[in-house]
Amino acid sequence: MKTGMKFISIILSILLIGSFAGMFQNGIEMSLKEFWNQFIHLIGAIANLRELTYEPLFGSTTVYPVFPAIFEYYGYSLFILVAGFGLALIGSLGLTYITFLLPYRLRKMFIKVTGILEAIPDLFIIVVFQIAIVSLYKETGLLIFEVVGGFERPIVLPLITYAVLPAILLYRIMLLTFEDELVTPYVELARGKGLSTRRILLKHVLRNALFTVVNHSRTIIVLMLSNLVMLEILFNLYGLTWFMVNNISVEIVVIGILMIFVPLFLIEACSRFFIQRITGKELAE
């Protein structure tokens, strides 16, 4: 019930913010009547998606329907977003597991280093990856990954670039979580029974670490969504956010945000349900 109410309230908030932005689309007209007209217009646009159109760039005067053309851009962005999060999660879990098999002093050093890496700007990482691949190609003639896209969308380099910062953030969260879990009574009991460090990490600590990851998932997703805009623009990837930026209208932006929000909300709700069932702990709302 709470999840359903939250879903409806967020959808309504997106529509209200879009209605407010629509008041500035053709000059500034601040009035409740105009706000209400924009709100009704947005509802109508969502109810009649087939009638929504856009005019492509490059001087074309031809008008095209937004649907189903937008699904080509949407599918790519959603894949990069979900696959990037999955790659970051798997990479950070693997690094965390390896780190806790290292000596205590070396582990502390890793925690300090991740604190420094976390401060690196997103834009800097994207540009460095592009320059590195281009420089390698110029020096050796070897093109490891495609650097920029278009309709021939590269996958590997954007995905790796996109996953770096979330992986660092997740790695830092899991390092701190693992440290807290390793001093709990149940871990001490497991050690007393003669269980190895590897088995304790995999069987006991990892389960509770996933609980913490889900609790921080919203912060990570917000970070990844902001990075997705920069990634698609700098790599010239024809994804959904690229489409929204290059075809600015309240209707397209609101519908694009809803298309991103709905699957992410459902994925998070399902993850919370399963993690609560596995751990028996109540997740923070």
Image (cartoon, rainbow, N blue to C red):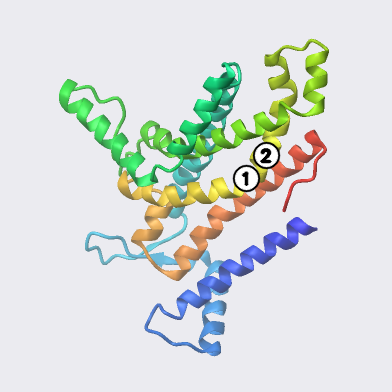
Q: CA distance from mark 1 to mark 2?
A: 6 Å
Q: Residue at x 75, y 46 (%)?
A: 283
Q: Position of residue 131 (x, y in %)?
A: 25, 35
Residue on which the image places disc 1: 216
Q: Is any atom of residue 266 visible in this view?
A: yes
Q: Position of residue 272 (x, y in %)?
A: 72, 44
Rendering quarter of residue 120 = top left
Q: Residue at x 52, y 34 (%)?
A: 88
Amino acid type assigned to the residue bearing label 1 in the image: His
Q: Position of residue 149 (x, y in %)?
A: 30, 41
Q: Residue at x 28, y 36 (%)?
A: 130
Q: Secondary structure at mark 2?
A: helix
How packed mark 1 is, by other alpha carbons closer than 10 Å (few <14, some 14-19, many 20 or more), is some
How packed mark 2 is, by other alpha carbons closer than 10 Å (few <14, some 14-19, many 20 or more), is some
Q: Position of residue 114 (x, y in %)?
A: 48, 34
Q: Nearer the viewer, residue 14 or 205?
A: 205
Please, which residue is most extreme toward the left here? Answer: 139
Give left or right: position of 199 versus 254: right
Give left or right: position of 28 versus 225: left
Mark 1 near mark 2, Cβ–Cβ under 8 Å?
Answer: yes
Q: Which mark is on residue 78?
A: none
Amino acid type assigned to the residue bearing label 2 in the image: Thr
Q: Secondary structure at mark 1?
A: loop
Rendering quarter of residue 212 = top right
Rendering quarter of residue 4 = bottom right
Q: Which mark is on residue 212?
A: 2
